[in-house]
Image: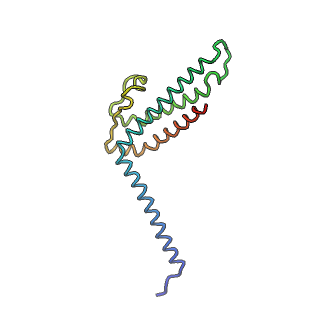
Amino acid sequence: MAPLPSISIASIVIGFISFAFTLAIWIHAFWGAFLTVVSAPSQLRDAFSTLRQSLYEEREYLKRKRRREKGTQDRDSKQRSLYDEGGPTKVINDAVKDLIHDFKRYERPFLETPHTGREKELEWSFDATQQHYRCDFSHRLLWLRSKGGIESIAEKLQKVSEITFWR
């Protein structure tokens, strides 16, 4: 039997190395998903309560900012520009409202007892930070799918906060 040519040996080695990398990537992905499912109860509570508090704080800050801007405007002027009417601040406020709406859509399936009162009652109440979330196996899998969306909302809120900080 003739020895294998060197190109065949190189091809076999590259094939085994590629298979090892593929296997390592799969194990890493499944391990990350496993850790997310196992630590879902604490991640749920932390992510939702922190993000809710940040959203409400940003909305309150924008309300105060718009009130200050309205107070400094000349009230006798009938022709106000879009900027004077709070154009950029209003756009940012609408973006925060959209983020709150998206957040509630993600949070709703996890809540054990949904809040039935007015939104104002929940914003700064003790209940806002003491929500209880369902965390059985199906909700843990749902968290695995929803976690990216929650992180996306947090990133968008961070960008909005940076914009309002520099304005």
Q: Please state which of residues 14 and 40 is positioned toward the viewer in this rendering.
A: 40
**In the image, residue 49 lies at what x, y percent?**
40, 35
Q: Residue at x 52, y 37 (%)?
A: 158
- Horizontal arrangement in the rendering, residue 148 relative to residue 137 (left or right): right
Q: Quadrant of residue 51?
A: top left
- What color scheme is it? rainbow
- Horizontal arrangement in the rendering, residue 23 relative to residue 82 (left or right): left
**In the image, residue 23 lies at what x, y percent?**
43, 62
Which residue extends farthest left?
136
The relative height of residue 72 versus residue 112 in the rendered view (above or below) is above
**In the image, residue 7 lies at what x, y percent?**
54, 77
Which residue extends farthest bottom?
1
The relative height of residue 156 versus residue 57 in the rendered view (above or below) is below
**In the image, residue 76 lies at what x, y percent?**
65, 12
Q: Residue at x 54, y 28 (%)?
A: 93
Which residue extends farthest top?
76
Q: How many marks?
A: 0
Q: Residue at x 47, y 64 (%)?
A: 21
Q: Quadrant of residue 72?
A: top right
Q: Residue at x 46, y 62 (%)?
A: 22
Q: Quadrant of the C terminus?
A: top right
- Horizontal arrangement in the rendering, residue 119 relative to residue 136 (left or right): right
Q: Please state which of residues 3 and 93 is positioned toward the viewer in this rendering.
A: 93
